[in-house]
Image (tube, rainbow, N blue to C red):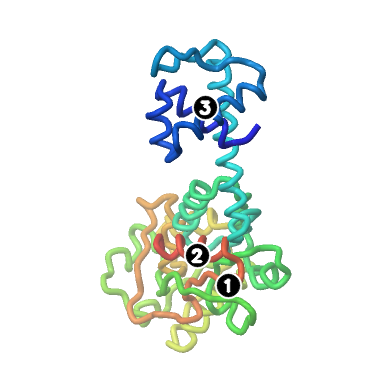
Amino acid sequence: MEIEKLRSFMEVYECRSISKAADNLFLSQPALSRRIQALEAELKIELFHRNGTVFEPTEGAKTLYKEAGKILRQHEQSLIKLNQFKKGLGGSLRVGAVPYLKLAPTARAVSLMREKYPDVELTFDCDMHTNVPYFLANRTIDVGITTYGEVRGLDGFSCEVLSKNTLAVLVGRGHRLWNKRPLYPEDLDGETLYYIEGTTNHSAVAVSQFYREQKVRFSQQIPCRSISELMLYLAKGDGIASCGVVASENFTVMRDLVDVVPVERTEMDQGFIVALFDNGNPLAQKFVEILKELW
């Protein structure tokens, strides 16, 4: 059964008129009549009762109309999928991100991508720590979101800067720096610094390097096993912790007790947030375009 025959049948069914349906389909009336007759012969049923210029559908036509609508919708969806495949917009897309960046823009981009390309199998892993270059190089992911310092020197991929990054500190209510605005690097001298044990990502490395360059000396540096433990120490007003401004929205727990204070004059190029992807992958390009609008 040809698609054009079904489309012609549905137009006549809806118009109840050969002449009006022919005009809508940009066909001559004889050509449209031949299509209807050919469909009737193929199905071996009468589809319309001719009453002058009015075409009244038979019971068989009413049944066919319901099924024809499903067939045409399926046909259109198949054409869309095929067209996306030809453009490289079909298949799968794998996105990976390090956990210490703000995740809301990336999660929103994933959601929008799924809405725009519902047939694409999209996966999002936001817990890759320092493995983004490895997973990109091994084609385990198609788009990696991390800091510039982590991927600098990695060849064969396109790199888009999503956001600059400056230093911020986390301080508890009652700490001497709670309402300190503006806050400068030298104001941190002599503080107790809490940090997450085992943190070796390039953002943390960039922060440590920055402190050394600014000759900031901490009275002591205390490791914590988790963010929860770190936040509990800070909530007591004891010491500080460091993070990039772009990661600060992740520290919303106990926000009434722990504040994020930006540190002036601390832009870190190694801490710039970037999206790395294969420029030959159209899906990856589309995703990064959406991502850039949201960051």
Q: CA distance from mark 2 to mark 1?
A: 10 Å
Q: CA distance from mark 1 to mark 3?
A: 46 Å
Label 2: element kind: helix
Please give the label number shown on residue 163: none
Q: Report the mark closest to the observer, 1 or 3.
A: 3
Query: Quick check: 129 left or right of 271?
Result: right
Q: Is residue 219 above or below residue 13?
A: below
Q: Residue furthest right?
A: 138
Q: Nearer the viewer, residue 165 or 178?
A: 165
Where is residue 257? Give x, y as percent.
37, 53
Q: Which residue is mark 3?
A: 9
Give SS at disc 3.
Answer: helix
Image coordinates for residue 156, horizontal then vertical, percent: 64, 79
**Dot 3 amino acid type:** Phe
In-front residue for pair 36/206: 36
What residue do we see at 57% from left, 64% from top?
282
Bin the neighbour count of mark 2 within 10 Å (Cα to Cα): few under 14, some 14-19, many 20 and up: many
Q: Residue at x 53, y 66 (%)?
A: 285
> Residue at 61% across / 84% down in the picture?
153
Q: Which of pointers 2 and 3 lies earlier in the amino acid sequence? A: 3
Which disc is residue 288 wearing?
2
Q: State the CA–CA distance, disc 2 to disc 3.
A: 44 Å
Q: Amino acid at mark 1?
A: Asn
Q: Which mark is residue 279?
A: 1
Give the percent coordinates (x, y) of residue 95.
Answer: 60, 59
Q: Residues within 10 Å of mark 1 (few under 14, many from 20)?
A: some
- Left or right of 27, for residue 74: right
Q: Quadrant of the N terminus?
A: top right
| SS category of the residue bearing label 1 | loop
Q: Using residue 152 as the reference point, say whether residue 232 is left or right of it.
A: left
Give the mark nearer the N terminus: 2 vs 1. 1
